[in-house]
Amino acid sequence: VLWNRPVSFIFIRESRYTAQFLDAADSYTLSFFEEDLRGALTELGSKSGREIDKMNYPGLTPVEKDGAVTFKEAKLTLVCKKLYRNLLSETSILCPDVMKEAYAKGDFHIAYIGEITECFEK
């Protein structure tokens, strides 16, 4: 809970294709799946949406929820309205090891805070 609202915190590297979609939308979804889809999700996570059409991946069925997309196969989906966005910066990283290990190339994460507005359970 932040600002008297139920919230989620997510972090996406600025260079990721997903960041463009997040910045263009008012909301996002967080989708959680059963273990049997781990292989498909690992493959999806290892490829960019610039390379493959993730919305038409075999075995996953996209579903729109309040302007954001989840999948019919998700066991739990949180719909989140964006409240905050900020690019992490070198001056805010307090641990030199984190800066060296995670941001040596300067590819910082964008922090988003979203109000959880709906929850759908399969």
Image: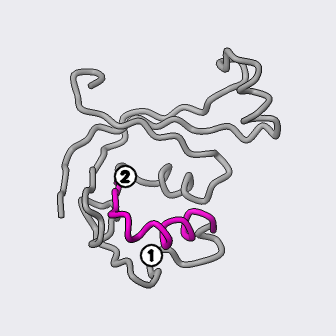
In what element is the residue under mark 1? helix
Looking at the rendering, in which quadrant would you find the N terminus? top left
Residue depicted at 50% across the width and 74% down the height: 54
Q: Crowding at label 1, few (<14), some or many (≥20) Cα neighbours within 10 Å?
A: some
Three-letter amino acid code at disc 1?
Met
**Vertically, is 119 above or below 72?**
above
Left or right: residue 46 compared with residue 75: right
Across and down, in percent, residue 50 comes to 64, 71
Instruction: State how far apart marks 2 and 1 are (Cα).
Output: 15 Å
Across and down, in percent, residue 78 comes to 27, 50
Question: Which mark is drawn over residue 55?
Answer: 1
Three-letter amino acid code at disc 2?
Tyr
In what element is the residue under mark 2? strand
Residue depicted at 63% across the width and 54% down the height: 16
Q: Crowding at label 2, few (<14), some or many (≥20) Cα neighbours within 10 Å?
A: many
Across and down, in percent, residue 111 comes to 52, 35
Q: Examine the residues drawn in magenta and state their main secondary structure.
A: helix
User: For the magenta stretch, what is the residue range?
Assistant: 29-47
Looking at the rendering, in which quadrant would you find the C terminus? bottom left
Left or right: residue 87 compared with residue 113: right
**Vertically, is 49 above or below 57?**
above
Q: Which residue is mark 2?
A: 28
